[in-house]
């Protein structure tokens, strides 16, 4: 079998394998010299002829005239110089052929080379890979060419090729007259202006109905995420020094309004946070132990009660969740961009902040549902009388940012192999009309091995097992096009797969079997990390947050041998890879991460990617404090700000310890009181027993001892309560004194 495959050509008479053409270009019965078939629907033909009398007769089928004229070249075979030709037009329009008598400039005998391109079926690639030992494989590639031209190819050099070249039809035979405008000597006193254009692109006719509104959510339908100041249904109580200086300039975002919300209060007396995803999904609610009562400060002080946010109606929030789920499923695989418009009433304080905050909440929810961040844009719509709501609009024809378009184009170019395919048979061959031939493209030993490929992204991928695959290097200088791959072992068939294009001298991984020897348990999770504090105002912080998605995989090797596993992972536009195995290859727009496993070994691999989002956070919320802890340990942020955050976190930890201590004291007091009740009952029983004097004395002594413990614990409880009250005041003062010394420079740079 190998000897048969080793030949450079295998001609197979496959009569009836495809469409037949009874017509073809005839050149004075001059036979073909070379044919190159391409994958874009055309073929290149070369004919050599000896012309006597200065005339060469060419008969071209009418359906191929335009392709023929578009690509025709006539050159002198000796000098290589192009020869001018003339084509007579006087002939009937009802014949199947157009007869072209190419008039050469000289009547002398001349050898000419005639080349042209006409329509042809595309060739199909097919590959064989024989797995060997010691990191080598044998690869064979064949091109299946179909001769449906209507003429026999006898003694023709046949080749195949492909490239990024475009191909089309264009009318060059028809006589084209141009209608010219008649001008008159008249003056024009007024010229109408051009039509206006929509910011959503398109022409006025196609966008007559305006932008495509996908859905609207009123303020009550937007679920506030964990840590949001309005996530608490309780009343916000705050205090402020009457002589407190105004907010420093560095705590404001310039030059554009910040998306932080002015919620009216400074500090939250009691917070309720929601355990769930940052995108605002529902979850179990719990009370945080950070603050439990309003603080008191030395005079002069005043306690201000901020307006209570409207209570969130669970049914309305559920309606909003349903809208977002349905919309996300509709647009996640769409190519449209989404504009999120946040509306607010300009007559209310903090209108721009509220509009941006609501829009960013919805943006984060779309990202959590799988919509690419690069496709989402946020806009604020602030005007008198605007209802507080968010509107989602599909951008029909977005105006591309030149810088972003350049980056996107570069990414698209990098996603596909670069190069051309050009394989030619070195010896003439014959292919009868209506037959197909197999032309050898490559037969060579190359680097390769058997590996495993975990692919849960593709349509026919698998979530739990890795595919057995063959990895090999393309030894040619041409791209190996997409085609089926048959894999052989030691004189046996072991599987087949389909390869993606493999660039010259690069590697490809082709899965061919699923033996369930490599097991993968995959867990997905999300978390948020502070990356930059934008504004801070009265206990409410707007921050740039890195929203991180984790794909944590536990990979187990059931084989008795070492296994090399490649994990396929595609990073969508708008996300950035931040953690992954160090060894990887690129295949198209995907990464192939390499993991080596010993026999019976299990490894945990975490692939993490992040995208920036903006969030409004209550500094009292547990989720905010957790993010602040990570922020303090990170490399971002100024030292001054980190020292302030460390102070806040230290006070919060001290407050939590005191609260835990108070709870422990209360539990001890409950135990003491329960024991005293038991002793009291026993003493009352012994009063009726004449011989119980000694026991009565012991129980009374025990009763007094426990009473002393109760008194001591009560004093400890009071002291602890005082410490808690003092620490609460210190904690809230530390929050109120937090500043952002690093924002001034950022704001100044934004204003340039």
Image (cartoon, rainbow, N blue to C red):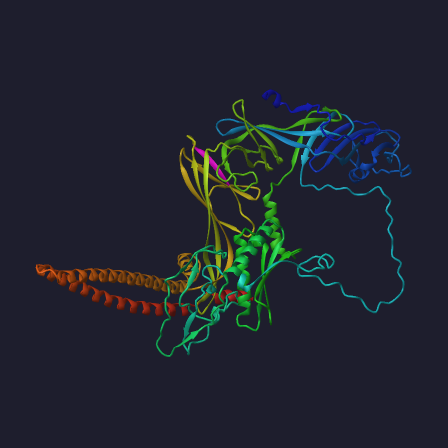
The residue under the point 83% across, 27% down is 29
Indicate left or right for 470 with 31 as reference.
left
Quadrant hosting residue 182: bottom right
* Magenta stretch holds residue 564: yes
Indicate left or right for 39 with 666 as reference.
right
The number of numbered badges drawn on the structure is 0
Q: x%, y% of residue 551?
A: 47, 46
Q: x%, y% of residue 510?
A: 55, 34
Task: Look at the magenta stretch and give its main secondary structure.
Answer: strand
Q: Quadrant of the N terminus?
A: top right
What range of the chain is rendered magenta?
562-567
Residue 82 seen in the current view: no
Q: Out of 675 and 445, give the one closest to the viewer.
A: 675
* Magenta stretch holds residue 156: no
Q: Out of 611 and 155, give the one closest to the viewer.
A: 611
Q: Out of 719 and 540, give the one closest to the viewer.
A: 719
- Establish if 7 lies above or below 699: above
Q: x%, y% of residue 59?
A: 84, 32
Residue 45 seen in the current view: yes
Q: x%, y% of residue 23?
A: 81, 31
- Establish if 229 lies above or below 136: below
Toward the front, the furthest residue is: 688
Indicate left or right for 736 with 702 as reference.
right
Q: Out of 190 and 195, give the one closest to the viewer.
A: 195
- Establish if 419 lies above or below 249: above
The residue under the point 48% across, 58% down is 545
Q: Quadrant of the C terminus?
A: bottom right
Quadrant hosting residue 639: bottom left
């Amino acid at each position: 079998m190998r000897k048969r495959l080793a030949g450079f050509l295998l001609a197979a008479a496959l009569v009836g394998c495809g469409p037949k053409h009874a017509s073809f270009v005839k050149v004075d019965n001059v036979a073909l010299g070379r044919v190159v078939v391409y994958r874009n629907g055309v073929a290149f033909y070369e004919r050599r002829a000896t012309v006597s009398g200065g005339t060469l007769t060419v008969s071209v089928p009418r359906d191929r005239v335009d392709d023929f004229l578009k690509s025709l070249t006539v050159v002198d075979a000796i000098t290589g110089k192009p020869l001018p030709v003339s084509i007579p037009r006087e002939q009937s329009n009802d014949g199947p052929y157009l007869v072209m008598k190419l008039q050469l400039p000289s009547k002398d005998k001349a050898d000419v080379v005639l080349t042209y391109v006409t329509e042809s079926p595309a060739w199909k690639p097919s590959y064989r890979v024989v797995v060997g030992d010691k990191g080598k494989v044998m690869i064979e590639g064949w091109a299946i060419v179909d001769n449906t031209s209507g003429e026999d190819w006898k003694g023709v050099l046949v080749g195949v090729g492909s490239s990024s070249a475009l191909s089309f039809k264009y009318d060059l035979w028809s006589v084209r007259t141009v209608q010219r405008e008649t001008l008159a000597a008249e003056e024009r006193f007024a010229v109408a202006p051009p039509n206006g254009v929509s910011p959503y692109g398109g022409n006025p006719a196609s966008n007559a109905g305006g932008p495509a509104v996908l859905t609207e959510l009123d303020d009550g339908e937007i679920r506030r995420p964990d840590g949001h100041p309005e996530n608490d249904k309780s009343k916000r109580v705050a205090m402020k020094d009457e002589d407190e200086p105004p907010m420093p300039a560095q705590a404001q975002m310039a030059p554009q309004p910040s998306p932080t919300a002015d919620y009216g209060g400074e500090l939250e007396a009691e917070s309720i946070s929601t355990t769930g995803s940052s995108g605002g999904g529902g979850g179990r609610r719990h009370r945080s132990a950070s603050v439990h009562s309003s603080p008191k400060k030395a005079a002069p002080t005043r306690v201000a009660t901020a307006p209570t946010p409207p209570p969130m109606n669970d049914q309305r929030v559920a309606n909003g969740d349903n809208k977002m789920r349905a919309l996300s499923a509709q647009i996640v695989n769409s190519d449209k961009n989404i504009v999120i418009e946040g509306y607010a009433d300009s007559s209310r304080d903090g209108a721009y902040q509220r509009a941006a905050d609501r829009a960013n909440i919805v943006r984060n929810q779309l990202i959590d549902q799988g919509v690419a961040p690069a496709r989402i844009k946020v806009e604020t719509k602030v005007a008198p009388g605007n209802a507080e709501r968010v509107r989602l609009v599909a951008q029909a024809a977005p105006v591309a940012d030149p810088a972003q378009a350049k980056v996107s184009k570069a990414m698209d170019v990098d996603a596909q192999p670069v190069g051309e395919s050009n394989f030619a048979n070195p010896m003439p061959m014959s292919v009868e009309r209506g037959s197909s031939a197999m032309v050898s493209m490559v037969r060579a030993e190359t680097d390769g091995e058997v590996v495993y490929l975990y692919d849960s992204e593709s349509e026919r991928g698998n979530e739990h097992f890795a595919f057995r695959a063959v990895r090999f290097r393309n030894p040619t200088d041409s791209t190996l096009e997409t085609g089926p791959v048959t894999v052989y072992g030691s004189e046996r068939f072991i599987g087949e797969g389909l390869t993606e294009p493999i660039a010259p001298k690069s590697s490809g991984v082709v899965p061919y079997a699923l033996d369930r020897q490599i097991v993968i348990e995959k867990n997905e999770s999300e978390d948020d990390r502070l990356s930059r504090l934008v504004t801070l105002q009265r206990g409410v912080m707007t921050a740039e947050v890195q929203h991180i998605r984790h794909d944590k995989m536990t990979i187990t090797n059931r084989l008795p041998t070492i296994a090399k596993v490649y994990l396929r992972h595609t990073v969508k536009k708008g996300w950035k890879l931040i953690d992954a195995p160090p060894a990887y290859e690129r295949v198209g727009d995907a990464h192939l991460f390499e993991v080596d496993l010993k026999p019976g070994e299990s490894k945990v691999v975490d692939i993490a990617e992040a995208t920036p989002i903006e969030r409004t956070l209550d500094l009292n919320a547990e989720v905010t404090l957790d993010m602040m802890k990570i922020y303090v340990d990170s490399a971002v942020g100024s030292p001054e700000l980190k020292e302030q955050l460390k102070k806040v976190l230290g006070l919060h930890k001290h407050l939590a310890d005191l609260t835990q201590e108070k709870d422990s004291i209360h539990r001890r007091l409950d135990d003491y009181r329960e024991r005293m009740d038991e002793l009291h009952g026993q003493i009352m029983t012994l009063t009726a027993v004449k011989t119980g004097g000694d026991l009565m004395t012991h129980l009374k002594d025990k009763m007094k001892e426990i009473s002393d413990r109760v008194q001591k614990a009560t004093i400890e409880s009071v002291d602890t309560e005082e410490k808690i009250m003092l620490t609460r005041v210190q904690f809230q003062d530390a929050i109120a004194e937090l500043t952002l010394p690093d924002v001034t420079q950022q704001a100044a740079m934004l204003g340039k």
